Amino acid sequence: MAEPAPPRLIVLRHAKSAWPEGVPDHERPLAGRGRRDAPAAGRRLYVTGCVPDLVICSTARRTRQTWDLVAAQLGASPEVVFEPRVYEASASTLVAVLRDVPERWRTVLLIGHQPGVQDVVLSLAGGGEAEALARARVKYPTSAIAILSLSGPAWRHLAPGTATLDDFTVPRGDTAT
């Protein structure tokens, strides 16, 4: 019997947000560009076969709006957890959140914020596609997607260097208004 494919982690930085005056950071909505780019990220996940079983999303308004626009493109209904610990999280906090994922979830989408998303990708990636690693090191823009394959079968063993960065892309939506 063939061994199952390794678990995959998809790390998505929320789409471009607006900065309305007087609005607390946690409640900032997506900007127009973000509303165009988030569906493009969802289409990218769909066409590459990276449809998640589980979504772990920050509770911030911009991440929830990003998820809603991504989800509309997936043709699936994964379980979604809005996790307060993801908002303003460090890489170590994000790893702790991911270690709590039950083994039954094979493809997990994490939607969060800078610098935590970039830091967790670079920390976990013990290797991978050289150009993707280089681009992820330089900049992790809004709507960027990193796809990592885990080296072990269980999320609880996640640690620095235990994943391979398979892809890093920055989908952009139609720029027409």
Image (cartoon, helix red, strand yellow):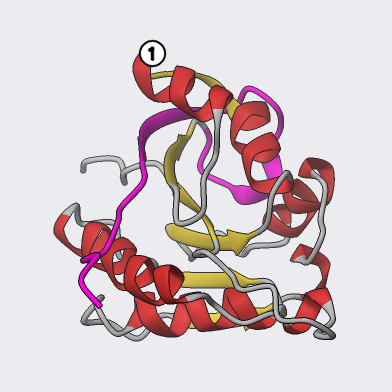
- For label 1, the residue is 130
In this picture, is 154 found above or below 53? above
Question: At 73% across and 75% down in the image, what residue appears?
Answer: 83
Which residue: 51% across, 75% down? Answer: 31
Who is closer to the viewer here, 35 or 81?
Answer: 35
Residue 87 in view:
yes
Q: Which quarter of the figure has residue 103?
A: bottom right
Residue 105 spot, x, y in % from top left: 48, 64
**Does 156 appear in magenta?**
yes
Q: Is residue 53 visible?
A: no
Where is residue 154 shown, x and y percent of the image? 58, 47
**Horizontal arrangement in the rendering, residue 63 relative to residue 73 (left or right):** right
Front residue of 82/63: it is: 63
x and y, in percent, of residue 45 in the image: 28, 59
- Give the prevailing secondary structure in the magenta stretch: loop
Task: Estimate how packed mark 1 is, as few (under 14), some (14 to 19) or many (20 or more) residues with alpha carbons within 10 Å.
Answer: few
At label 1, the amino acid type is Ala
